[in-house]
Image (spheres, rainbow, N blue to C red):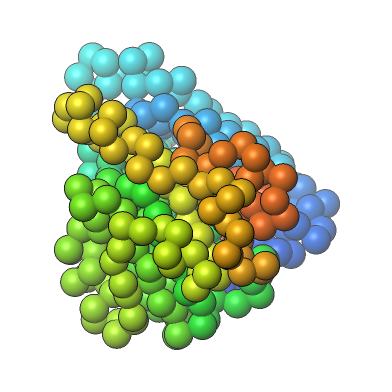
Amino acid sequence: MRSIIDILDLSVEELDELVAKAQDIMKDPQKYAHKCEGKKLATMFYEPSTRTRLSFEAAMYELGGNVLSVASAASSSAAKGESVADTARMISCYADILAMRHPKEGAPLVAAMNASIPVVNAGDGGHNHPTQTLADLLTIHCEKGRFTDLTIGLCGDLKFGRTVHSLIAAMCRYTGVKFVLIAPEELKLPSYVKTQHILPSGHAFVETTDLEAVMPQLDVLYMTRVQKERFFNEEDYLRLKDSYILTPEKLKPAKQDLIIMHPLPRVNEISVAVDQDPRACYFKQALYGKFMREALILKLLEVD
């Protein structure tokens, strides 16, 4: 039995295998329609979620399985003070696999240490979001055809953005990747992400506050929202929330084969006018996430 808490829990070979499996599911969904019959996925989300939760549930239903769902922490025994460890033990009695989101870093790890079923981290605070990274990887592979030799711009909230931290960790394992880190001073990428992942890998990176200046270099632009829920005071949030707004005008110097990604939800950091641009991939990205979660569920449940 195995859990996935961090994207680095998966080897490069396993990432490639999951991408190949997801692409096979996309080509022939009927082949997989009964693979998880009799299996149950539990979703336990202590923080609001639309895409991650629904895509886990859709993935399990499309594999022929069933879903047990807790609507929110307030409607669970967590409201009575039940620990994450006890919740994980209890859910293990009812389900075959658990997807958990929690505002506290490390909570899904605690769940995995106490559960007797596989646990998937569906986001823990500002720390990790491995299945969003799987969605991101499938998007990059389907749209660019490779993981190597890419210049990836990461823009917005790089300090609290768990999707950014996980994507950097994953992409550092491929050759020829350059990171362009675009953020206001207050939301720069934490130094621990650089020292843990970028510096040991020897990948090139630059830090800038100017999105337009670096736009022509980029093969991938990964936009993020400034996350109100991670700020301690509203003044800082209001001052920083509109730091970057992507518009058709700002995309004029960009490469024709650029792909624009966003983990969603979008607030106003990408103008709706960009949605019509063929380079906009963020809604496709949400769809790709469902296929990658299907591939991961099959792997963790050891379904052939």
Of residue 214 and residue 206, the one placed in the foreground of this image is: 214
Q: Is residue 47 above or below residue 100?
A: above
Task: Please give the name of the residue rendered at 54% of the width and 53% of the height, measured from the top-left corner.
Answer: 250
Q: Position of residue 213 (x, y in %)?
A: 42, 65
Q: Quadrant of residue 181?
A: bottom left
Q: Nearer the viewer, residue 262 or 208?
A: 208
Q: 80 or 102: nearer the eye?
A: 102
> Quadrant where the C terminus lies?
bottom right
Write down the quadrant of residue 242 in the picture.
Answer: top left
- Who's the residue at 32% across and 75% down the image? 205
Q: Quadrant of the N terminus?
A: bottom left
Q: Position of residue 207 (x, y in %)?
A: 29, 66
Look at the picture and state if 156 lies above or below 8. Answer: above
Residue 264 place in picture, x, y as percent: 51, 41
Looking at the rendered structure, the number of numbered marks drawn on it comes to 0
Front-most of residues 30 and 19: 19
Taking the image as shown, residue 81 lies to the left or right of residue 293, namely left
| Residue under the point 67% across and 67% down | 256
Q: Is residue 15 visible?
A: no
Residue 272 position, x and y percent, is 62, 37
Instruction: Establish if 75 lies above or below 112.
Output: above
- Identify the residue shown where x is 61% and y is 69%: 255
**Is residue 225 in view?**
yes
Q: Is residue 78 above or below residue 297?
A: above
